[in-house]
Image: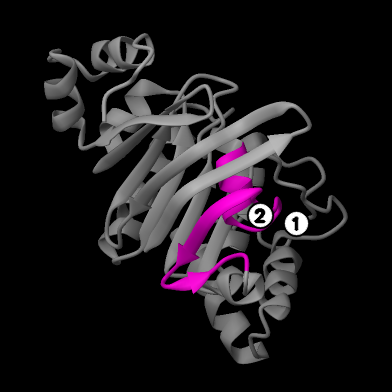
Amino acid sequence: MIEVRGLERRFGEVVAVDGVSFTAGDGRITGLLGPNGAGKTTTLRTLYGLLRPDAGAVAVDGVDAVADPLAVQRLIGVLPDAHGLYVRLTAREHLRYVGELHALDAATIASSIERLVSLLDMSEIIDRRVEGFSTGERMKVAVGRALVHDPPNLLLDEPTSGLDVMSTRAMRTLIRELKDEGKCVLFSSHVMQEVSALCDDIVIIARGRAIAHGTPAELCQRAGEEDLEEAFVRIIGTDEGLQ
């Protein structure tokens, strides 16, 4: 479970995240939905420790992310917006390296890699260098890094960005499987179709604030719309938002 309370993050005079609060539960898919520049990526970067919050609190499975960031990093798997792969390493070397960073023993790493090869359909690329990989192949490696230590919580920043139709479908299937395993899945997106297809809960972020949250049905009801996209447009167009 991921709990965020009153999260704030500034860059100079710019308030990127302004008092955001929400909870992402275990065995559920929670989506951060908002237009570009709304504060979704900054929120996620603060959650996984890349940025330090200026105010507020973040807890992962009850562990304070500011007080004990290393403990939190063992509890989360992260797919960042920039994948940062090393082009001279093979896919297997990437996974082994991250496993070693998490202090997994050699046998556990080998077993985890074989599981991921099957789960992510990586048999044809696992021993190839990343240089020259397609966007979809790079995404598989990045997802594998996030999952190699089998974390109970996943943070995914626009996980289908740049993927073709078939790769997008495969990613959505994987996210549902992770949910079915009881994991807490939190992902950001501005693609309405993706959020509608996947999410149990939605947090709408606009202008750095969480202006609405609830299930898709609850958000439609509060906005007085039958369609989630229309509800989203109505909500972000309301200065006060819907709480």
- 241 or 46, nearer to the observer: 241
Q: Secondary structure at mark 1?
A: loop
Q: Contact (CB < 8 A) between labels 2 and 1?
A: yes
The N terminus lies in which quarter of the figure?
Answer: bottom left
Q: Position of residue 231 (x, y in %)?
A: 24, 16
Q: Secondary structure at mark 2?
A: loop
Q: Position of residue 103 (x, y in %)?
A: 68, 85
Judge from the rendering whether residue 100 lies leftward or rightward of residue 43; answer left or right.
right
Residue drawn 47% across and 47% down?
A: 6
The verdict on residue 63 being magenta is yes
Amino acid type of the residue tagged 1 in the rendering: Arg
The verdict on residue 18 being magenta is no
Find disc 1 in the rendering and name its residue: 128
Residue drawn 36% across and 59% down?
A: 184
**The quadrant where residue 162 appears:** top right
Judge from the rendering whether residue 137 lies leftward or rightward of residue 118; answer left or right.
right
Residue 113 visible in the snapshot: no
The C terminus lies in which quarter of the figure?
Answer: top left
- 65 or 185, nearer to the observer: 65
Residue 92 visible in the snapshot: yes
Amino acid type of the residue tagged 2 in the rendering: Ile
Judge from the rendering whether residue 168 lies leftward or rightward of residue 134; answer left or right.
left
Residue drawn 44% across and 53% down?
A: 4
**The quadrant where residue 171 appears:** top left
Q: Which residues are magenta?
A: 42-66
Q: Is 18 located above or below residue 238 in the figure?
A: below
Residue drawn 46% across and 66% down?
A: 60
Find disc 2 in the rendering and name its residue: 125
